[in-house]
């Protein structure tokens, strides 16, 4: 691996004319976000005074689609939402952000799934999840070949890999038949419980996003350097290794490029990785260079940290431009 020149990667010309930049297969949730003073303060029958919780749409699939649409992209979401109290805010946010919702199924008689997210001033967070099984997106929700042929990239969220879908390979086969590139993100719980699944699916994907723990688990290595060396032989043509305050590494068979982290006032880090993926993929879909895509991803990830929860930090392409130009 060298850093003499940033590696190159471009979408094939035949994909650039398709009408949908990113089609996202993933889940949609409502979040209740509570900031606590510190982990040591929780428990012991204490009475903690907190700021009023906020509610925001979330779920990795919804996050990537919303961020991509807010940045000016054409983003479609394949997901499920209910029709009750915990689903209406999610549905409203998808529409407000400009996401194409024609492939979002509304399941009647279901309130919705709820994530209770505890964050602290250091940006760390823990999630308490209530997931309605009726609202788990499945392979059967993927649209047909004609719809897939309109998309440049099919992005599959990492938590989808933790669900028990024996025909995940069929999803990949449909996307390949339609000529889409396949992108996927890791998920730390999946890396901890089913690392072999992460390894398998990373190897089936064209583009991969992984944080430090996901990269090490999937590559069965001990250091980010070793993971970066291993990823090209695992199968993906392009890998983004997100290393938090150390920035990110971009890996292809040509070599490795490094991108800095961008400094903002951090409220929490929820959905920073989703914003990174959305911005990077969108720039590639617009015919941009890999170096610019990675830098835009890093900037978008930083901007996502300015709000509580997944989608409460609202920014657009001009804000990304401004952060990049401020350095």
Image (cartoon, rainbow, N blue to C red):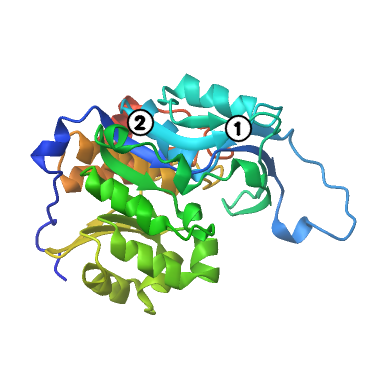
Q: Residue at x 15, y 65 (%)?
A: 253
Neighbourhood count class around disc 1 (C-alpha, 10 Å): few under 14, some 14–19, many 20 upward: some
- Give percent across and percent down for residue 55: 66, 32
Residue at 52% x, 59% y is: 162
In x, y percent, where is residue 8?
A: 12, 53
Q: What is the x, y in percent for residue 106?
A: 57, 29
Callout 1 secondary element: strand
Which is more toward the observer, 37 or 126? 126
Compare marks 2 and 1 and give the one earlier in the sequence. 1
Q: Quadrant of residue 207?
A: bottom left
Residue 327 appears in the picture as rendered = no
Q: Where is residue 244 drawn, in percent x and y?
A: 42, 57
The one nearer the camera, 143 or 18, is 143
Q: Which disc is residue 155 wearing? A: none
Q: Which residue is mark 2?
A: 75
**Image point (49%, 57%), residue name:** 165
Q: Secondary structure at mark 2?
A: strand
Q: Is residue 238 left or right of residue 40?
A: left
Q: Compared to 135, does 183 lie above or below? A: below
The numbered mark at residue 56 is 1
């Amino acid at each position: 691996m060298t850093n003499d020149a940033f590696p190159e990667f471009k979408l094939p010309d035949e994909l650039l004319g398709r009408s949908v930049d990113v089609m996202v297969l993933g889940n949609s949730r409502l979040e209740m976000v509570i900031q606590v003073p510190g982990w040591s303060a929780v428990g012991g029958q204490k009475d903690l005074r907190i700021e009023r919780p906020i509610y925001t749409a979330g779920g990795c699939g919804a996050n990537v689609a919303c961020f991509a649409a807010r940045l000016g992209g054409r983003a479609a979401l394949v997901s499920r939402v209910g029709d009750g109290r915990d689903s209406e805010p999610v549905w409203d946010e998808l529409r407000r952000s400009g996401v194409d919702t024609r492939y979002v199924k509304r399941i009647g008689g279901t309130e919705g799934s709820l994530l209770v997210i505890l964050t602290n001033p250091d940006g760390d967070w823990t999630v308490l999840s209530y997931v309605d099984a009726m609202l788990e997106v499945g392979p059967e929700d993927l649209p047909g070949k004609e719809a897939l042929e309109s998309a440049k990239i099919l992005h599959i969220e990492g938590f989808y890999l933790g669900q028990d879908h024996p025909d995940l390979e069929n999803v990949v086969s449909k996307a390949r038949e339609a000529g889409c590139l396949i992108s996927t993100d890791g998920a730390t719980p999946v890396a901890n419980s089913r690392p072999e699944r992460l390894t398998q699916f990373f190897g089936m994907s064209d583009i991969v996003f992984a944080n430090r723990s996901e990269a090490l688990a999937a590559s069965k290595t001990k250091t980010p350097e070793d993971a970066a060396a291993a990823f090209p032989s695992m199968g993906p043509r392009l890998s983004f290794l997100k290393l938090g305050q150390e920035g990110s590494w971009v890996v292809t068979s040509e070599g490795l490029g490094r991108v800095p982290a961008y400094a903002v006032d951090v409220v929490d880090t929820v959905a920073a990785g989703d914003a990174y993926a959305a911005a990077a993929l969108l720039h590639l879909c617009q015919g941009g260079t890999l170096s610019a895509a990675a830098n835009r991803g890093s900037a978008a990830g930083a901007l996502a940290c300015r709000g509580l929860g997944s989608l409460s930090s609202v920014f657009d392409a001009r804000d990304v431009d401004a952060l990049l130009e401020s350095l």
